[in-house]
Image (spheres, grey):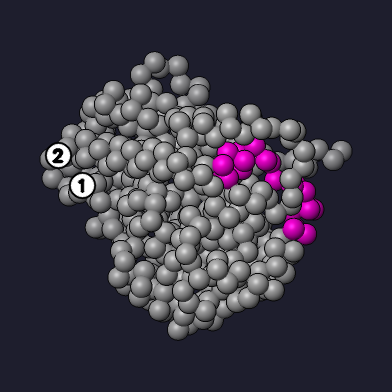
Amino acid sequence: MLFDRIEAAPLDPVLVSIEQFAADPRAQKVNLGVGMYYDAAGRIPLMAAVRQAESRVQARLANWGYGMSEGLAPLRTGAAELVFGADAPAIADGRVATIQSLGGTGALRLGAELLARLAPGAQVALSTPSWANHPSIFAAAGLPLVSYPYYDRATGGLDWPGMRGAIAALPAGSIVVLHACCHNPTGVDLDQAQWLALRDLMVDKALIPFLDLAYQGFADGLEADALAPRLFAATDLPLFVATSFSKSFALYGERVGALLVVTRSPDEAANLIGQCKNSIRNMYSTPPTHGAALVGEILGDPALRALWASELETMRQRIHGVRAALYERLAGIGNDTDLSFIVRQKGLFSYTGLSPAQMIALREAHAIHAVADGRICVAALNEGNVDRVAAAIRAVVGAGAFG
Ligand SMILES: Cc1ncc(COP(=O)(O)O)c(C=O)c1O
């Protein structure tokens, strides 16, 4: 019988954490496992710009017919301008191929599919650690995986010499997946000098950058967070960028993102879009239109865009605030471990250095849920829960150390 052969599939740790949280009956439970931004009241926001875009789109709605395989034009134009800047030479020259995707995940998967076709057998280098979904996305396209060092446990910062050395040793034509900002899970980013040096190294070694930009606007601001794509777009390297609007527009369930590929000519860009359309046609035919219409509306209207950008800035600042609050409340913990990385790390996550056993104790004894690797979603902290979270971390660390 066909189904006798079905084995239980290994579950993604984040999904396990979500299930454990849902099943926890304790009223004071806190979910620091999942990567979503929550506001000061602990809710996933519905942004005012999104509400306004929704009413405009609804007011002129004629129907929800199929869109094009490559996606809605306003979304595609808006995405390219957001990532590369409205006056980017690559956009003016018509060299950017932009394809609407099913969130950032879909952009990564579509890009991987394309690379498997254009560069079969090319290896894909991922940071250690990386977003848990990266390996399976690239492996699913049949691309071999290698890794490069990234996180330095001793400092809670970047292992820059290790990273640079490993990337320098990759064979020409390898694909290097880089988190453009707000590295998931560590929150550790390259600084400007490191990005410049890495870009020059990759030009020198003819390596292909694939930037994952899932958190534009959450690290240092909308423009500052686009540094890496803009630096690479100014080179002759082929460039892949997977961008997501899940977090920056709080449109998680709408599945909106884009794959952007910088080519050498408008003809190459057109051919690349054609290849993507073929892949899309046999996977899901056309992307969903609703969320993309909202993002396109916002990015195409200066007043709405300004409102959205200011809301996003408020979200970014709130994360900085809760990072500082957590850091303050943990002062002196763990034999005076230096925890300043909590305020230095960027984005939704902090890699706390707490051990798997300490993370399990947080869940079992204190109803604080997160994944065992010590990553916590700081964007789920607020004035109402930060004291309790800090007290629980103090309790599980006790007189011992982090990790
Ligand atoms: C690093 C990274 N890339 C991509 C994604 C995918 O985002 P989306 O939900 O838009 O597919 C995420 C989401 O958590 C992420 O953390």
* As drawn, 76 above or below 360: below
Inspect the image, locate mark 2, and give the three-letter code of the amino acid beneath it.
Answer: Ala
Quadrant assignment, res 181:
bottom left
- State the SS at label 1: loop
- Would the CB of label 1 be found within 8 Å of ligand 1? no
Mark 1, residue position? 339
The x and y percentages for residue 319 are 31, 39
Comparing 213 with 46, the one in front is 46
The x and y percentages for residue 384 are 28, 23
* Residue at 74% from the left image edge and 52% from the top image edge: 69
The x and y percentages for residue 142 are 67, 63
Is residue 12 visible in this depiction of the protein?
Answer: no
Crowd rating for badge 2 (residues with CA inside 10 Å; few <14, some 14–19, many 20+)? some
Which residues fall within the magenta stretch?
277-297
- Total number of numbered discs in the rendering: 2
- State the SS at label 2: loop
Give the alpha-carbon distance from disc 2 to disc 1, as whole Å.
Answer: 8 Å
Mark 2, residue position? 331
The x and y percentages for residue 76 are 60, 53
Inspect the image, locate mark 1, and give the three-letter code of the amino acid beneath it.
Answer: Leu
Q: Taking 261 as reference, is 87 left or right?
A: left
